Image: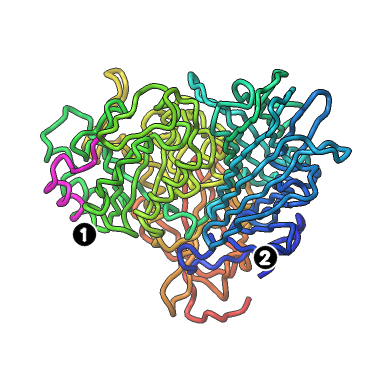
Amino acid sequence: MPIREPDPTERRPVTRNVTMSPMSTRKLTTSFRPRRDTQIKIRGRHFRLTIDAQRGGEITHLQLFGGSAWNHLIGRDDQTFPQLRLRIGRTDFALAHDPRARIKRFEATPDRISFQITAVPAAATGRASPWRVTLGYEIHAEGAVFIDLKCKCAQQSTSLAAAAVCLSVDRHLTQSAKYRDLMFSRPGDVAVSSARVAFGVNPEKSFTNECQVIIEDKRGLVGDVTCKRIGRKGRFVWSLAETSRRLPGPVRYQNRLALALGAAATGTPRTNVIGQRIYHWINWLNPPTDADWFPTPDAIDKMVANHATMLILHDNWMCRIGVNGRPHAVYDRARDDKAMRDTVKHAHRRGLRVGLYVRGIERYALDSRFFERYLRRNFDGLYVDWAGPHATAHHERAWPPEPKLGDRHFSSDGTIIPARDYFLHTKRLRQVVGPRGFMICHMGGSNGGILANLAADGYLPGETGADHNAFADRDTAFFKGMKGGVTCTPWTLDAAAYRTPEAIAKMAAWGFYPHVLIGIQRKPAEPLFPLDLDDPLYAFPLTYWRILSTIDVHRATVFNLPSDNVVAARCNRKNLGCLIYKESRPAPDAPRHLVLIANTSGTALKAASIELDRDVLGMSGQYQVSRIDPKSARPISRGKTIARLNVNALPRWAINGFLLTPSAAPNAKK
């Protein structure tokens, strides 16, 4: 189906079909006709872009979907991307000035579109430069765009005063109600700084979208590539040459740009971790025998009694855990094969999904097929530590490769950020766990942006000190949690502020799903997290978990998230957060709705009312209302409703839930 010209005012219907096949909304579409069209228009689930051969083959329009409308990231100011410019003498030459770029090698599948465009940078007068440029595009349905940049000059020698590429975000977007950007470089690393942008246009919401730009290789045309923010918000310039120099010819140069595009995750097919209750078994206490490391059947039974849905087994599940890549881990077998199989079998019998620890810097891990040996595809999953291409660059700067394990490096000194390779690795991880399995990624201090999470279900912040103030306010939580691109499942171990009634109320109101970490003490003076699940230290999320347990969250889509610009409910109290989980059920049963509310202020709230948007939520007829007892998860009948809920006064940081079940007469009218 042809893609129409991007229209920033266009609105998409806000109703959602939660019964789609797992990958149905991730497909790419294009109307491009080789040898006939000069523009390539591509549309994905949450992004659409135009590449124009009459503008040097650069991206001339780029939009991201924020829940109810398309928002221009590039193009309204007539700018392009990557906006390649060269300066020869006193003349500036721009790739976008070539009106006759040639498109070749176009290939398209629902998951990936690739092609090459060759062009000649030209002056504003039309005078051609002696340089020839090829842009090799590779666009993935998840929202990853890679551009292989190849520049060559056939002259025996040529002068070059400057060269650069640029991300210039539309000015109107930088003035949005919610906008943040930053230049990212992990402290101590030597790779090129990347750019991260997050935005949201609704002042009543938060960040709905994420964008990240990475230049892979630090090597420039002249000297090293450098990144600067120049002139205004949203303008990042990567200099490929800053010093005027005569270059001996012929000159050939190659680098790669990565553009990652994210949007809020509200349910399947984008994410399988909505509403999950996660126990994370670390057990670093007095290292036991191999078989005794695993949680006992009684411990697993207690997890289930506390309404858990997932069990993550940390690094000690394997025979050699390594130490963050020095030495590397060995994934060939579990520390105790029988104990591992017994643990997984009992967890599955009790309905728990199991995730195994793996490091993103150890790409060879999947070759051992440990997942296939112990876990179930399309049910279980992976917890990926040291995730992201920045973590790979950091690791390669610090340590040499270990070839006998299949460990290979992209550089000897950490000067390459392998964005494309890491993204393809995450797609391989996704293939391993399956479209209905799960993958949760943790980047720590390498948290440069959304690329590492495009194929993941969840992102785990909270360990690094910079994240410890995340729940100070909503926008900080959404920025640090990358909620404009992925579901957030925080690490609650290292920041006591994550385990307070305030933090849990905000997580409930904003759609965060915390890990409860078992069996660790960082330092003698710090809290001991024992193996006893009845310890009061682990009680902090239980009210939240009980309320979520009243529906099958694996079938749920969440509405009214601050990261999704669709208003599904309105409250008459400012600090009363409200999310609605729509649970699809097998026919002929109609969907149920769990309305979860939380007082996010430090004071009690008076009685309130909530008006649900029936069109957005796909509601029909009357609903039986049951208030969920927060101590027992028992439903207590509260009459019937069409769309309004009346809520009693709420103490500070209180969490409540209401289950709406269709009445016997589904066609009842208001």
In the rendered structure, does residue 330 fall within the stretch colored magenta? Answer: yes
* Rendered position, 654 above or below 27: above
Residue 410 lies, in percent from the top left, at 43, 32
* Rendered position, 186 above or below 610: above
Colouring: rainbow
In the rendered structure, does residue 538 fall within the stretch colored magenta? Answer: no
Judging by the rendered image, the residue that carries numbered circle 1 is 349
State the separation of the CA atoms marked 1 and 2: 49 Å
- Residue at the image point whose x is 44% and y is 80% from the top: 588
Residue 453 lies, in percent from the top left, at 48, 44
In the image, 261 versus 395, the foreground residue is 395
Comparing marks 1 and 2, which lies closer to the viewer?
2
Q: Amino acid at mark 1?
A: Arg
Q: Is residue 437 shown left or right of residue 58?
A: left
* Quadrant of the rendered image containing residue 332: top left
Residue 204 lies, in percent from the top left, at 67, 46
Judging by the rendered image, the residue that carries numbered circle 2 is 31
- Residue at the image point whose x is 65% and y is 51% from the top: 64
* Rendered position, 433 above or below 497: below
Q: Is residue 98 shown left or right of residue 651?
A: right
**Magenta-drawn segment:** 329-345
Q: Does dot 1 land on a helix, a strand or a loop?
A: helix
Disc 1 to disc 2: CB gap under 8 Å: no
| Mark 1 / mark 2, whichever is N-terminal | 2
